[in-house]
Amino acid sequence: MLLSGIGLGAIYGVAAIGWSMIWRSARLINFAQGDLSMISAFFGLVFVQQMSLPIWVAGPIILLLMGIAGAAAERLLLRRVMDAPFFSGIAMTLGISVMLVNFATVQFGAHSRPFPAHFGRDPVAVFGTRVFPDTLGAVVFGIISMVALHFFLQYTWPGRAMRATAQDKGAALLAGVRVDRMVMLSVAVAFMLAAGAGLLLAPLTLVAPSMGLLLGLTGFTAAVIGGFGSVKGAIAGGFAVGFLDVIVTTYLTTQFKNVAIFTLLIVFLMFRPTGIYGEYFQEKM
Amino acid sequence: MASGAELVDEEDSAIDLAGAMKRPVQSITHLFELQRRSRRRTYLAAGSVMLGLAILPLLAENRYHQHVLVFLMLNSIIVLSLMLTLGFTGQVDLAKAAFAAIGAYTTAILTVRYGLPVPLGIIGAALVSGVIGGLIAFPAIRTRTHYLALITLVFNEIQWNLVNSLEFTGGSHGITGVPEIVVFNQGTRTPGRYFYVVLVALGLFLWLSDRLVNSSLGLALRSVRDNELAANANGVNPTRVKLFIFGVSSAMTGVAGSLYAHYVGYIGPDAYRLIDSLAYLAAVIVGGIGTLGGALVGAGFITILPEFLRFMSEWYLFVFGAIIVAVLLWLPDGIVGTARRLYSKFHGDIYVKPHQ
């Protein structure tokens, strides 16, 4: 059970980082973030089941596709809306969300279906308990992506450029950073993270067009708890929510899980909107 | 506040709502807006619109068309309320459907379970919706505005879950037997008649909204939307203003919901879903943020268009989302906003944008 918590936590953490990144770079809350995970999961389904591609091939392809989609979305759609009053951004991402969900519903049907396991179906014995290999996979890949992302942001040139852009666009511009490219890159990375979260989560739960909303809100909760805009915070928040998820599901009913997460979200929003690690945001003037 | 004291009234940096109405904010923008549309022109336009709406049911070909028209009226009220919060104050309220449902359920419970007369049911609906709206908005208003969007989004689901599972609200079966509104001893359940009932309500709300928007409180609202910090510096209390308008808007939506219940005679959890909330948002955007006429246009958009798109049955939501995105990309002022902009350009007028 502990490992399930870590596994889910890793997934939520990855999703939460996606939220944070788009917020930091584009000053937008991407309501379609969860639906991106959902679309990725469906693409995974198509690739693996219908085209019989192994997941090792399909996964990176989907990640790449989503990255390109992210760049395209930023350039074509989001850029127009970044400077407009904030409700334009919200409405835009909501519109995209509706389109994605409906597209999936029409293409694939509204019912939920299982996703084939990445790593095999038989539980594996680890640390004295038995755990599904996909949970382990989620843990491993989740942690790998987080570490990789951290490394990328901290030590590589593009990563630091992205962080600079997120902190202060004007200063970054003066320092010679191609701010528009960096924003595009951030959005693309966020899309890829969403894809990763979706693909990792898919074998663990049923895949349906409506799963985007739930994953999105959970990821958002994680981001809020950890402090919106902070990658470290997103990770911490992700694990917190992951554990909460597992605990509530095990000891209470599954229905309650949603209520518990939402309540936590509302509590945090009311009393500690900056989260645990968060930076304090000034209202955009 | 130490410096700039002459910009801020003496008692407090925040003015109360009654004060806001007594002390109009003087500014060039205010002057332009006052001059731009004289009262008479407004009433003329409004009158002709109402007249046009009033003859609509007579033009309808059959009962189904009339039925759709009734929903057009109901949606207009809801979109109008959302226009007040979103269009004029900049608060993203994604839970309009939930509040309509609350209003409907309240009046249903009051009239069916407790046998109260219909007018009390409607008033109760307004009160309950308004209060709940205030409660929901309160935590979000003091934090970032995006949070209100999330909270209301979540609230939709919470409301739906609650209403679906509670015995008190009839569970998944809902409540049946909601009485109809009786005007001058005549039943009003037929679409042709009920249209006028809702039209009267819509007219009332439109008039109230117009007075509100063109008062100094309305200017305060718009200032909060455009630049909350500056508004605060000018003596507006954003929190109170936002809370007030959110409550009023929720109450208005509650009334619309109660009117729905009295028309259909039944309320269930599926009457107002999350998609409807998003549709109302689309209506405000397509119609034009910051315009009252845009509320009607937007309501028309979300009520009439699906009928035409019926042949696309499965793709219709997709097209909906696509239209929202398209409007945001190319017609950011909405239909009415763009029309006004073009009209002003044509006349060589100064055009005061509804929003920045």
Image: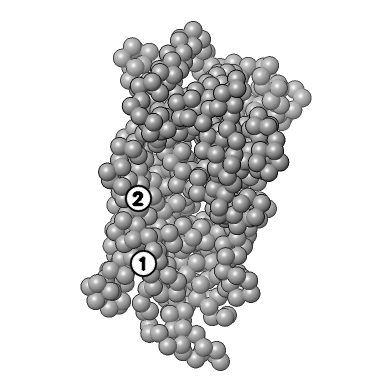
Relative to A219, residue B79 above or below: above
- Determine the chain carrying the residue at label 1: A
Identify which residue is drawn at 34% across, 32% down: B331
Q: Split into 4 quadrants, where in the image is the C terminus of chain B? A: top left
Number of numbered callouts drawn: 2
Front-most of B351 and A108? Answer: A108
State the residue at coordinates (64%, 74%). A251
Q: Residue at x 41, y 74 (%)?
A: A203
B320 up-or-down from B6: above or below: below
Quick one: B167 or A216, which is closer to the camera?
A: B167
The residue carrying mark 2 is: A99
Q: Nearer the viewer, residue A46 or A37?
A: A46
Does B13 sit above or below residue B32? Answer: below
Residue identified by numbered label 1: A41
Q: Amino acid at mark 2?
A: Met
Q: Secondary structure at mark 2?
A: helix
**Against B58, is A184 above or below?**
below
Q: Chain of mark 2?
A: A
Provide residue A250's location: percent of width, then percent of height: 60, 75
- Give me the C-alpha separation between circle 2 and circle 1: 16 Å
Describe the element under mark 1 as helix, strand or loop.
helix
Marking on residue B256: none
Q: Is residue A119 left or right of residue B142?
A: left
Looking at the rendered structure, whether the residues under marks 2 and 1 are on a common chain is answered as yes
Q: Position of residue B160 (x, y in %)?
A: 55, 52
* Residue B63 on image: x %, y %: 39, 31
Q: Residue furthest right?
A: B11
Dot 1 crowding, Cα within 10 Å, few <14, some 14–19, many 20+: many
Callout 1 amino acid: Ala
Earlier sequence position, callout 2 versus callout 1 = 1
The percent position of residue B96, horizontal first and vertical second, equals: 53, 40
